[in-house]
Amino acid sequence: MTQALGRHAELSPIPKRGRLAALWRQIKINKANYLLLAPFATVFFVFTVLPGIMSICLIFSHYNMLQPPVWVGWANYIRLFLADDVFLIALKNTFVFASITGPVSYFACLIFAWMINELKPKLRAFLTLLFYAPSISGNLFLIWTIIFSGDSYGLANGFLMRFGITTEPIQWLQDPRYMMGVIILIVLWLSLGTSFLVFIAGLQGIDKSLFEAGAIDGVKNRWQELWFITLPSMRPQLMFGAVISITQSFSVAGVTIALAGFPSTDYAARTVVTHLIDYGSVRFEMGYASAIATVLFFAMVLAQRVVQYLLRKMG
């Protein structure tokens, strides 16, 4: 009877007041940690969480920052998908851009990190800095503007005209036929950033005894080591790198604005984020801009869920 009562007490849910009391005790025990976390938590709440909540509240309203918000219901989304042709162009460009740059940059970061990790420490540190430098250096857009300049003095045009491949300069950053391809090339060159460093750190943290155990169990070559030992051991880093790659590929805007202009010719380099900047920072239609941001958010969440599913299947 006593044992039955004990099991019943263990299975019975903890009262809400008891959970709050336990939480308060944990806060008092770890008050120093919470105190150190408070500045960042405050800044994060004020500048990230609160604007996100306000954006959700504005998606069903018309708000121009001068007058109070006016409730419009689903009008913003009806306009977005049925009346805004430029948004549909931006949505198509964003998915094309993300479907190319996201996977390619992700696997490029992983492969280069895996190759560099096999080198000696000093050479590995030098090459890591060399590959990472483009993602943090400034004024790189100026270099690419010189390379793909639309006159005969541009390096790409000069090379093609010198060898007779073309007879007149190509407007790389003004012609819609070439614009997106050039931007994708530049973004891929700039893509060895945070994910690359995370993969390097993950490779450095793998227990070396796993490779010895794998050799005993029948792992015969480096590719089998990569598939059966390295990748499963790096699952947290792989997930973090996937989130970073998805975020960067869907949120591209600075490169397109700097190279193709704002707006670009025939909106050939228009993305969802540049469309958001247009309505949020130029026209101040904050309700409509919030609706655009919500669509972008759900697209990123969906892509992240797909990547999580694929990584779980891999394990």
Image (cartoon, grey):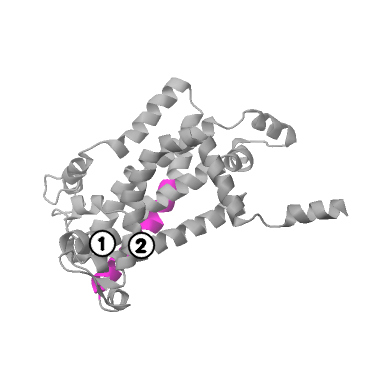
Residue 192 coordinates in the image, percent (x, y): 37, 40
| Residues drawn in magenta | 84-106
- Find residue 2 and name its label: none
Residue 290 coordinates in the image, percent (x, y): 29, 64
Q: Determine if the magenta segment contains residue 130.
A: no
Judged by its main secondary structure, the magenta piece is helix
Of residues 3 and 127, the one nearer the viewer is: 3
Q: Is residue 200 among what the camera can see?
A: no
- In this rendering, the answer to whether 117 lies above or below 46 is above
Residue 189 coordinates in the image, percent (x, y): 32, 43
Of residues 111 and 26, the one nearer the viewer is: 26
Mark 2 secondary-structure assignment: helix
Dot 1: within a 10 Å radius of its alpha carbon, few (fewer than 14), some, or many (20 or more) residues? Answer: many
Q: Which residue is mark 1?
A: 276
Q: Earlier in the sequence, mark 1 or mark 2?
A: 1
Mark 1 secondary-structure assignment: helix
Q: To which quarter of the image does residue 109 belong? A: top left
Of all residues, the one furthest to the right in this rendering is 1
Q: Residue at x 51, y 59 (%)?
A: 306
Q: Amino acid at mark 2?
A: Leu
Left or right of 72 on screen, residue 239:
right
Q: Which residue is mark 2?
A: 296
Q: Residue at x 63, y 56 (%)?
A: 15
